[in-house]
Amino acid sequence: MEEVKYYSQEGLDALKKELSQLESVERPKISQAIAEARDKGDLSENAEYDAAKEAQGLLEMKIANLRNLIATARVLDESKIDVSKVLIYSIVKIKNVKNGMTMTYTIVPESESDFKAGKISVSSPIAKALIGNSKGDVVTVQAPVGTMEFEILDISR
């Protein structure tokens, strides 16, 4: 049984777009490369042919994995997210207790994380510490630079 993974509609649409790109653009490119390499003669000593066939195998594996991911994906209804505590897809404003610096992060599945966009993976140390806590709570995060404390200032969706 495959594990169900939750996505925002935006995240699922991005997976579908990537799958479409692989099937409609990348697959024909590799087929063309195989055909061109085959036309060059003896396949037993043709490195281009071997490389193209290997690339095709990797591409087909990636396509199969994406299809499986999409088939088992579930879209999380963001309007039903409880904002009394930090959960996946919560938008959390936190303050570093030590230096007073504030940050806002959205907790997302690993596949949607983008630190520059303020989207942190649910499996990151900060997210793990925040999950299940409420506004006003102070959480301790074990980071590579040592222990850090963050106060949860606000939770929204």
Image (cartoon, helix red, strand yellow):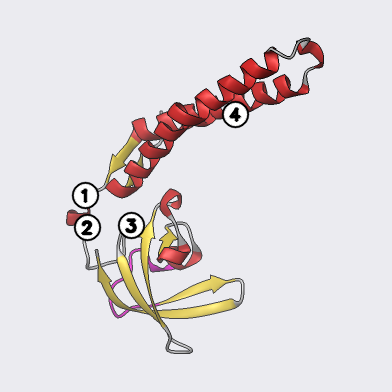
Q: Residues within 10 Å of mark 4 (few under 14, many from 20)?
A: few
Amino acid type of the residue that numbered disc 3 sits on in the rendered structure: Ile
What residue did someone put label 2 on? 81
The Cα–Cα distance between marks 2 and 3, rounded to whole angstroms, is 8 Å
Q: Residue at x 40, y 32 (%)?
A: 20
Q: What is the x, y in percent for residue 97?
A: 43, 86
The disc labelled 2 sits on which kind of residue?
A: Ile
Estimate the spatial distance between the alpha carbons at disc 3 and disc 4, rounded to whole Å.
32 Å
Specify the segment rendered in magenta: 129-138
Instruction: Provide residue 50's location: percent of width, then percent of height.
Output: 72, 21
Residue 107, image quadrant: bottom left
| Residue that label 1 marks | 77
Q: Residues within 10 Å of mark 1 (few under 14, many from 20)?
A: few
| Distance between mark 1 and mark 2 Cα atoms | 7 Å
Whether residue 2 is visible: no
Sequence-wise first label, 1 or 4: 4
